[in-house]
Amino acid sequence: MNLHEYQAKQILNSFGVNIQRGVVAKTPEEAVEAAKELTKETGTEWYVVKAQVHAGGRGKGGGVKLAKSLDEVKSIAGDIIGMNLVTPQTPPEGKKVHQVLIAEDVYYPGESEPEEYYMSVLLNRATGRNMIMYSTEGGMDIETVAEETPDKIFYEEIDPAVGIQGFQARKIAFNLGLSGNAFKEMVRFVFALYTAYTESDSSLFEINPVLKTSDNKIIAVDAKVTLDATALYRHKDYAAMRDIREENPIEVEAGEKGLNYVDLDGNVGCMVNGAGLAMATMDLIKQAGGEPANFLDVGGTADAERVEAAFNLILKDPNVKAILVNIFGGIVRCDRVAQGIVDAYKNMGSIDVPIIVRLQGTNADIAKKLIDESGLDVHSAIEFQEAADKVQEVLS
């Protein structure tokens, strides 16, 4: 589950990570009051107005701007709230901004120049260890840094059974070129950040930039946090942070119906039972010359109501030119699935795209007969290759 920047910072701060402080506002008037509150708390007289959407690259899209007065706070907030913010990480139409974060100015003058770093914590699946990835090139797209100057990216792997050690935190601070008080501050920052990552059951913490201020403080200026959804039962307060306005509405609807659905960019809809079979089905579609339009796992039950809900979800995608139903009848009998498909088809009245149904497993022969004798415009198949051929046929 993804979080907004202000929510990610709340979690970081709760574990002792120093953050750029800010207040959320939903209207220009609230933005002004937030700025006044921030001035009382921090003494700042300049403010950063940040669009709160689940996407990176907000500054490039005009979603992050500096305000040097309360009048500018109101004006900029009014421009950003309600806009469709387009970034490299949003859909082409962008994402609507419902709120902004009014943050303190942390790039103030002092004894030294501010410096920006990149830091993230995630799981290295190849080694089964947690990993801190960091770079001196903060404030930039880490993908660009990796491509153009890979020598400026460092990695520190941590055994989750042992936790981060002092020498590892010191190594990170040393590789970032820090010394004196900034070195000590970075060591504390790394310890707190790693603790926040593990204790919150997150799958990703990304801070870009981590800032060394002009007076040698180390703070998180931005924050991207992805929580492990399967662990949210342990964090009711985090689960309450979910903002479904930022999620794909079809995927939200699927979750409410108990279906596992991921929206993709292809032209062939998939309805499958089991994640492994779903992946194999997507490969089958590509081999047949199509592109999967979704990942949809209906699970172990496939009655008429569930199948109808799945069809409705798939058909909401205007790019779908065909639907492939690929069910293995192990827990559920194929003939029951076939009857569910027939009933769902009849309940829906008519479906304008061709449907290929492959049912394999218990009572597959009976299921094929039910489909063939239903009188509906449905193509039945038993073998994988047969299904692939029919997909290719209806797309050509």
Image (cartoon, rainbow, N blue to C red):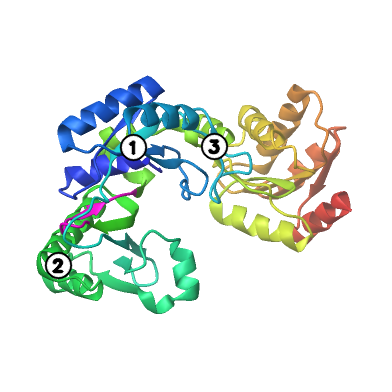
Q: Is tag 1's residue or tag 3's residue first in the polypeptide sequence?
A: 1
Residue denoted by label 3: 95
| x, y percent for residue 101 | 35, 35
Q: Is tag 2's residue or tag 1's residue first in the polypeptide sequence?
A: 1
Residue denoted by label 2: 183
Q: Which mark is residue 68?
A: 1
* Residue at horizontal 16 percent and vertical 67 percent from the top: 162
Classify mark 1: residues with Cα within 10 Å, few (<14), some (14-19) or many (20+). Answer: some
Classify mark 3: residues with Cα within 10 Å, few (<14), some (14-19) or many (20+). Answer: many
Q: Main secondary structure of the magenta part?
A: loop
Q: Quadrant of residue 375?
A: top right
| x, y percent for residue 336 | 66, 36
Q: Is residue 129 visible?
A: no
Classify mark 2: residues with Cα within 10 Å, few (<14), some (14-19) or many (20+). Answer: many
Q: Quadrant of residue 356?
A: top right
Q: Is residue 261 visible?
A: yes
